[in-house]
Image (spheres, rainbow, N blue to C red):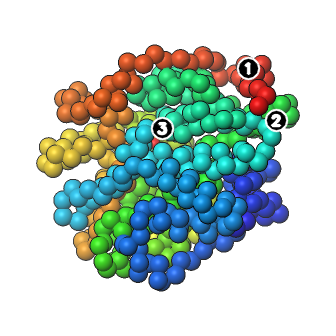
Amino acid sequence: MLYKSLKNNKYIASFKEAVLFGQSPDKGLYFPEKIPLLEKKFFKNLSNFEVNDLMMEVIKPFIGNEIPYKELLNIISNTVNFKINLKKIYENFFSLELFLGPTMAFKDIGVKFLSGCIKYFCKQIKKNIIILTATSGDTGAAVANAFNKIDGVKVVILYPSSKISFLQEKQITTLGDNILALEIKGNFDDCQLLAKKAFYDEKIRKKLFLTSANSINIARLLSQIFYYFLCYKLLFKKKNNEKIIFSIPSGNFGNICAGLIAFKMGLPVKHFIAATNINDTVPRLLKSEIYNPYPTKETISNAMDIADPNNFSRIMYMFKHVKNLKKIFSAYSFSDQETINIIKFIWEKYKYMMDPHGAIGYLGLKKFYFDKKNFNYKNIFLATASPVKFLEKINKKLSDQILLNEKVKKLLKKTKKSIKLSNEYENFKNWLLTSNLDYKR
Ligand SMILES: *Cc1c(COP(=O)(O)O)cnc(C)c1O
């Protein structure tokens, strides 16, 4: 499979190049030249596949022979080495729990897969690779975990000081080794800007081999396609041509973009709902057909505090026009107060605890259900993070209901190690060039 730049079709990359460079030379996002349509036979058999084999079937067409079958299977089994549950909340409402991995958010899946690919490609090049990534919390945690102690890889994570949750900060700053945590005085946008500038800085590029682990990386996007298929396996033991409705709590719109690719591959989805917090660029776009991001606002679902979603251009590329997109896709936004109220309500009524992101997914599902009177379908929201990660974001009475396991308790006691920097680019550049990141192998 080849990947083309969405800015200029003349930039074509192999899977390996798309993964290692992240973006095309013209700063465009890569996208598969063609989305493979899976065979009817595959869908008939879907419920019989083991989880690993299912992921293999779904992702293999995108990779071709760039990673040998055995290696790819190895990467996959390291990626999904934890459970993914489908929990019934009541009647036709279900939570797809994607947060049971090592850092307790769905990003573990995409990032772990990416790290496996990079580890494989790394052996073929002579240089050390520097993973440079800006995070609003969960990406940084998943990246630190997935790339820890990989030979030939150093990881630099930029996070906004005091704007990520307590547990997220511990996950990023306590591993040490090849993981360097830069605590930036500023917000997530500042961090992202620093990272973006560095990627296209000639002086830095001459010295360091930089790669991004952000959700623009095609390996992260493609590995997320699989759990939409898995959901059908979990939901239907035999018959699996029933259509279902998915609601996805969305920030950078990578997760929902993967869902839409699954749909294009033939998955019989009835409708997708993008649920956002008050950073509502996409819900407004669907109404006005004008893409007009406002400045980012802080919310309790901080992993979705993004006003200009990176992956949205991929979605528009697939559907060409808002009118086409709207046939399969709706978008709603919700406030912090609505989020807290619904967490409390669902806990009290069904004894099910949602995190602020998953809660927004549930709210989207509910709104669509009543707006469209679509009462006959199965409704699934993606639970993207464990409530444990966002304890301080909800009120004490509620958070006291959440039990901490031993692993979390241990993590909370570890000592944070970060490098504090201002948000000025020259400072950051200087640090990158003088920190001995390109150590000889
Ligand atoms: C990153 C993240 C999201 C948003 O996912 P996108 O792919 O950026 O839309 C939602 N919930 C949680 C918990 C996240 O970490």
Which element type, helix, strand or loop, lies under badge 2? helix
Between 97 and 194, the residue placed more toward the observer is 97
Which residue does the numbered mark 1 point to in the structure image? 435
Which element type, helix, strand or loop, lies under badge 1? loop
Please tell me how crowded label 1 is: few (under 14), some (14-19), or many (20+) other residues with Cα within 10 Å: few
Tell me if I can see residue 374 in this picture: no
Q: Is residue 59 above or below residue 300?
A: below
Tell me if I can see residue 4 in this picture: yes
Label 3 within 8 A of ligand 1 by Cβ: yes
> How much space separates mark 1 and mark 3, taking CA atoms?
25 Å
Q: Is residue 259 left or right of residue 429?
A: left
* Amino acid type indicated by mark 1: Ser
- Percent position of residue 206, x then y: 86, 34
The disc label shown at residue 138, or none: 3
Q: Is residue 105 above or below residue 17?
A: above
Give the farthest residue toward the left.
349
> How much space separates mark 1 and mark 2, taking CA atoms?
15 Å
> How much space separates mark 3 and mark 2, taking CA atoms?
27 Å
Identify the residue at image location x=62%, y=42%. Answer: 213
* Amino acid type indicated by mark 2: Arg
* Amino acid type indicated by mark 3: Asp
